[in-house]
């Protein structure tokens, strides 16, 4: 596949015919959708979002919604679990395997992700020392956690490898990062959603190039590179000398893939700096709008502490607010950011339906928040700790620090199982709403 300046010049146009303009058109046509496609978006939020989204995926898989979805758009922590789902050979025997009172294989990986000093030291020694060194180490650790079904090969597999992403019976995977570049002749660092799929990578301004031909320095883009890029929250970006943008932290340098003879090229830099998708928007929605999805299931598991009253949770909804103010799909939620937040910020109401129109998608929005009904139902579980959900949004022996959950290194089985059970509970308690919504896509 050669460089392509644009796949959807009419950004936001809805309908299956828009999806058919993209390189995955054969995959989408096999779903036999005639009018509107369905996209599922898993937000960022570090460990917390990965674990919660794991429970959401298990629920959506069990009730048949994932088999109806056309796209799976993942960001940051959501990409950690979304890529494992998209690449597993054994959905029920590996990915969704769930013994009652002990961790499954994926949960064991969570528990030892960064808290294993011997593993971390090994990856530090083995990673190639170049300007992507920190990102390389990070990607290797992520692969050993979330691609561990594939063993050591999980660290080396190219994203474009045939048969790696299983989109024959699953949605088409889009891993979202943020590309940082300087438009020619300026010191302004511009950010855009950087989309990575098994066929192609790119953004709306920079255009798209083949994943097979895109190199993360010395190697073709690997699955571990895509996950590390999407989850590189700890990164900053500064104007450099010449035309470059300098990344600091977990960000990654990718070579400029724009053709040399491209007229009015967006940038003259030799490299782009790419990092966490949450730097642009943490919900993964833009990629689905760009492909014309008429229906979106959006899971928002951002770090968002609560200070609840009798009727309101008083969350901040940073990712959603950013989305509404940046893109044109706010009318799918209603009119006015404050009105939207008042509607969704209700205690014990994690699922909300927003009706779109002919120009914006319908959205089923799922928010990670407290759930007294979950606490009541799961209080007898042997791994459940009293008041777990309250601790989740505060501090406590078994709790997450909601502001720093990505940096927490000692996740234990009880924390993982309770949070994934919460995601599964939200889906099963609202089973008919999810199934009816998915059925709209046809």
Image (cartoon, rainbow, N blue to C red):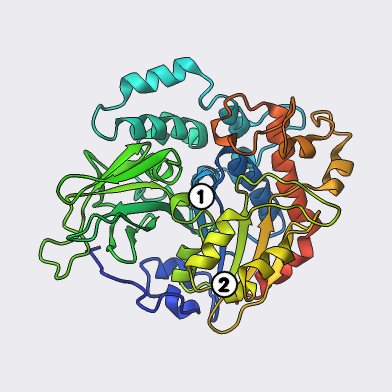
Q: Check the image and name the residue furthest to the top.
A: 118
> In the rendered picture of this protein, how many numbered marks are placed on residues?
2
Which of 11 and 396 lies nearest the eye of the viewer?
Answer: 396
> Whole-percent x and y of residue 404?
58, 35
Residue at 76 percent across and 28 percent down: it is 101
Q: Check the image and name the residue furthest to the bottom.
A: 358
Would you name the residue on which mark 1 appears?
A: 86
> Whole-percent x and y of residue 250?
38, 36
Which of 312 and 51 lies nearest the eye of the viewer?
Answer: 312
Vertical side of 22 occupied by 200: above or below: above
Residue at 40 percent across and 17 percent down: it is 121
Q: Check the image and name the residue furthest to the left.
A: 261
Q: Is residue 434 visible?
A: no
> Whole-percent x and y of residue 368?
69, 50
SS type, badge 2: helix
Would you name the residue on which mark 2 appears?
A: 330
Alpha-carbon neighbours of circle 2 within 10 Å: few (<14), some, or many (≥20)?
Answer: many
Q: Is residue 408 visible?
A: yes
Quadrant into which the N terminus falls: bottom left
């Amino acid at each position: 596949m050669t460089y392509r300046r644009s796949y959807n010049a009419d950004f936001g146009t809805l309908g299956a015919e828009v999806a058919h303009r993209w390189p995955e058109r054969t995959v989408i046509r096999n779903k036999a959708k005639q009018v509107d496609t369905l996209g599922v978006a898993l937000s960022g939020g570090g460990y917390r979002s990965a674990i919660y989204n794991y429970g959401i995926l298990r629920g959506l898989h069990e009730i048949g919604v994932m088999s109806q979805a056309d796209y799976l758009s993942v960001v940051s922590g959501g990409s950690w679990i979304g890529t494992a789902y998209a690449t597993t050979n054994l959905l029920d025997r590996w990915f969704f395997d769930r013994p009652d009172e002990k961790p499954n294989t994926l949960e064991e990986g969570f528990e030892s992700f960064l808290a294993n000093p011997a593993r971390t030291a090994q990856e530090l020694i083995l990673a190639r020392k170049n300007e992507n060194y920190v990102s390389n180490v990070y990607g290797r650790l992520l692969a050993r956690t979330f691609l561990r079904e594939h063993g050591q090969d999980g660290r080396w597999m190219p994203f474009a490898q045939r048969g790696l992403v299983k989109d024959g019976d699953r949605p088409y995977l889009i891993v979202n990062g943020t590309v940082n570049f300087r438009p020619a002749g300026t010191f302004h660092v511009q950010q855009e959603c950087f989309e990575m799929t098994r066929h192609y990578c790119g953004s709306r301004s920079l255009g798209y190039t083949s994943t097979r031909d895109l190199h993360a320095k010395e190697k073709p883009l690997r699955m571990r590179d895509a996950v590390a890029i999407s989850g590189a929250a700890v990164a900053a970006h500064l104007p450099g000398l010449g035309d470059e943008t300098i990344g600091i932290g977990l960000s990654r340098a990718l070579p400029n893939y724009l053709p040399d003879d491209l007229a009015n090229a967006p940038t003259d830099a030799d490299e782009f700096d790419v990092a966490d998708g949450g730097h642009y928007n943490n919900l993964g929605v833009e990629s689905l709008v760009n492909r014309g999805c008429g229906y979106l299931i959006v899971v928002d598991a951002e770090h968002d502490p609560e200070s609840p009253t009798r009727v309101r949770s008083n969350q901040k909804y940073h990712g959603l607010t950013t989305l509404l103010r940046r893109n044109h799909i706010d009318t799918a939620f209603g009119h006015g950011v404050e009105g939207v937040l008042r509607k969704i910020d209700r205690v014990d109401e994690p699922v909300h339906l927003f009706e779109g129109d002919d120009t914006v998608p319908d959205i089923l929005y799922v928010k990670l928040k407290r759930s007294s009904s979950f606490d009541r139902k799961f209080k007898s579980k042997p791994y459940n700790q009293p008041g777990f959900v309250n601790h989740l949004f505060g501090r406590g022996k078994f709790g997450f620090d909601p502001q720093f959950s990505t940096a927490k290194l000692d996740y234990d089985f009880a924390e993982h199982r309770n949070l994934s059970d919460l995601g599964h509970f939200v889906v099963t308690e609202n089973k008919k709403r999810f199934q009816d919504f998915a059925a709209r896509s046809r």
